[in-house]
Image (tube, rainbow, N blue to C red):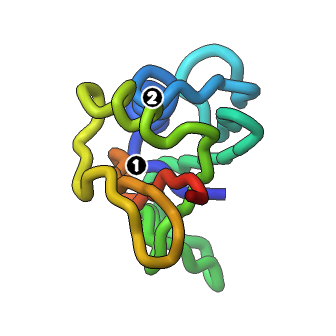
Amino acid sequence: MLAARDMDETIAFYSSALGFEVVSRMPEEGTPFWCRLRRQGVDLMFTWSAPHDHEPGEEHSHEPAMTGSLYIYVDDVTAFHDDVKGRVDVVHGLSDEAHGNREFVVHDPNGYVLIFGQIL
């Protein structure tokens, strides 16, 4: 479950730019507080909560945060890269890596690092 800064922007990025399908969202009308997106068998869930004062003992951030990255395998990374490169900011171009994968890197609107790869 990943935190989103803006659910409408997050859904638009993943569906329009990366080709994910919105599988479900709550609520179904208006801006959701939760959604599940899917592409080639990969499901991602996002959640959003309006900024609010914390109740006693409640601690969480409203800002998305992650110290790592999300690595998503795709069937044909070269074709996927060529398809999305005009719609996303590719921060590390398509390359063959020493660990045996071909991959490229983008950032989503929440600041998450997404690596799309394929085993060579």
Residue at the front extreme, as displayed: 120
- The label on residue 37 is none
User: From the viewer's perspective, is 57 left or right of 86?
Assistant: right
Q: Position of residue 65 (x, y in %)?
A: 44, 70
Q: Nearer the viewer, residue 112 or 117?
A: 117
Disc 1 residue type (three-letter): Arg
- Judging by the rendered image, the residue that carries numbered circle 2 is 8
Residue 33 picture quarter: top right
Q: In the image as oriented, which residue stretches furthest toward the bottom?
A: 57
Tell me the quadrant of the picture where the N terminus can be found.
bottom right
Q: Position of residue 112 (x, y in %)?
A: 41, 59
Residue drawn at x 64%, y 24% is 21
Label 2: element kind: helix
Give the vertical position of 99 relative to 30 (above or below): below
Question: Which residue lies under the disc numbered 1?
Answer: 5
Residue at screen point 65% across, 25% down:
22
- Nearer the observer, 101 or 90: 101
Say which amino acid is labelled 2.
Asp
Judging depth in this view, the residue of 59 and 12 nearest the camera is 12
Between 61 and 22, the one lying in front of the other is 22
